[in-house]
Amino acid sequence: MAVERGFPVGWSCRGESMKTGPPEQLVGVESIEHQEAPVPQSSVSMAGQSNSAVPSCDCLAHVYGNAADLPERQRRYPSDMTDAEWVAIRPLLPVPGWMRGRGGRPEAYCHRVMLDAIRYLVDNGIKWRAMPGDFPPWDRVYAFFRRWRDHALIAEFHDRLRAQVRIRMGRDVEPTAGVIDSQSIKADAVVGSDSRGFDGGKLINGRKRHVVVDTLGLVLAVMVTSADTGDRAAAEVLLAQVADAHHRLALVWADGGYTGSLVEYCLATLAVVLAIVKRSDDMRGFVVLPKRWIVERFFAHLMRSRRLVRDFERRTTSAEAMIYWSMIGLMTRRLARPRPQRA
């Protein structure tokens, strides 16, 4: 199904006064909330026309697609989005291609239910075929996951959420500093020999997750490789991607595994200072190291998502997408928190 990137337009946060009509005639959020929309009397589903007089959900699949023909699902799992989370993320969702005349038929499954299904899988670590019966069929959920993965929509959606979280925390949208590190993880038997290896330092047979996070612990870039890939070799590629996407990035902290020629490469080629935070030899036991604890906290969060405790993905792109989905759950909860009242 064709999908086009971009910000959805023409809806209100809760869908109280939804305007119907062709997508190109929709108006902005500020004006639509104060208009009375004519309610169509027919329940026939057509592209660009509401298929229900009273949509049970305000997602695009319900308002303009065929999702209203299916019974509404009752939210019952801890991983399900709350109404506050849905209000926060709904304006950030990509616009389906069928709303822009790019082909494909209107979707028959609610977007919110699809997101809840993937969040349930990541949070509980189930198999795709073990999807609970109150969600859409597992192959439809996987098709939704695969479409977002292959069109890089999951990374785009993640980046929009990260920008909103940074603004809410009083930070600039573009970060100026970050932290880089890697995590070796055991791989399941479904992982082929072409993307798995043995990490001699950690004694782990599997894959390695290379990540760069900002000072809030939010992902700037992630790359999954075989476990025998060196940290410096992967960091050279990963930092180049981060520097290209975030032009204000000037400082990156790292541990002792990133010393050597990588420091000179980052300064000369990427105009990024790579600061090494080393652990002194006289330290005993657990010690919180400056800045490095940020990325360690990020890895601890990943371990709370059972799908990420071990690498179960056949493709490295799927493994990277699972990390994005785990962080999306974290950021939506942060956005849904009530703002603290200042004295």
Image: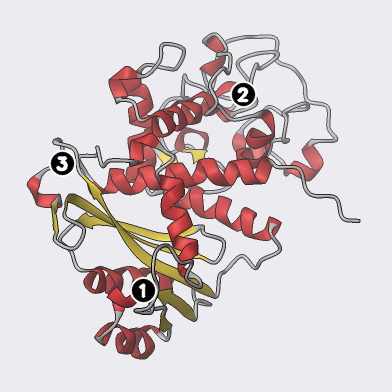
Q: Is residue 216 or residue 103 the one in the foreground?
A: 216
Image position of 94 with respect to 70: above or below: below
Residue 217 in the image: x percent, y percent?
A: 52, 59
**Kind of residue at disc 2:** Val
Residue 313 in the image: x percent, y percent?
A: 24, 39
Along the polypeptide, which appears first: circle 1 or circle 2?
2
Query: What residue is at 52 percent from the left and 34 percent from the top?
Result: 99
Along the polypeptide, which appears first: circle 3 or circle 1?
3
Viewer can see residue 8: no
**Kind of residue at disc 3:** Val
Residue 27 in the image: x percent, y percent?
A: 72, 41
Determine whether, in the image, residue 209 is placed left or right of residue 20. Answer: left
Q: Nearer the viewer, mark 1 or mark 2?
A: 1
Give the residue at mark 1: 255
Image position of 312 with respect to 281: above or below: above
Name the quadrant of the N terminus.
Answer: top left
Q: Is residue 202 or residue 116 the one in the foreground?
A: 202
Query: Gap in Å between the C-alphas at discs 3 and 1?
Result: 28 Å
Classify mark 1: residues with Cα within 10 Å, few (<14), some (14-19) or many (20+). some
* Label ID, residue 191: 3
Q: Secondary structure at mark 1?
A: loop
Query: Gap in Å between the C-alphas at discs 3 and 2?
Result: 40 Å
Query: What residue is at 8 percent from the left and 47 percent from the top?
Result: 193
Determine whether, in the image, residue 157 is placed left or right of residue 32. Answer: left
* Label ID, residue 56: none
Classify mark 2: residues with Cα within 10 Å, few (<14), some (14-19) or many (20+). many
Q: Residue pushed farthest right?
A: 343
Determine whether, in the image, residue 2 is placed left or right of residue 66. Answer: left
* Label ID, residue 63: 2
**Kind of residue at disc 1:** Asp
Q: Residue pushed farthest left?
A: 193
Q: Secondary structure at mark 2?
A: helix
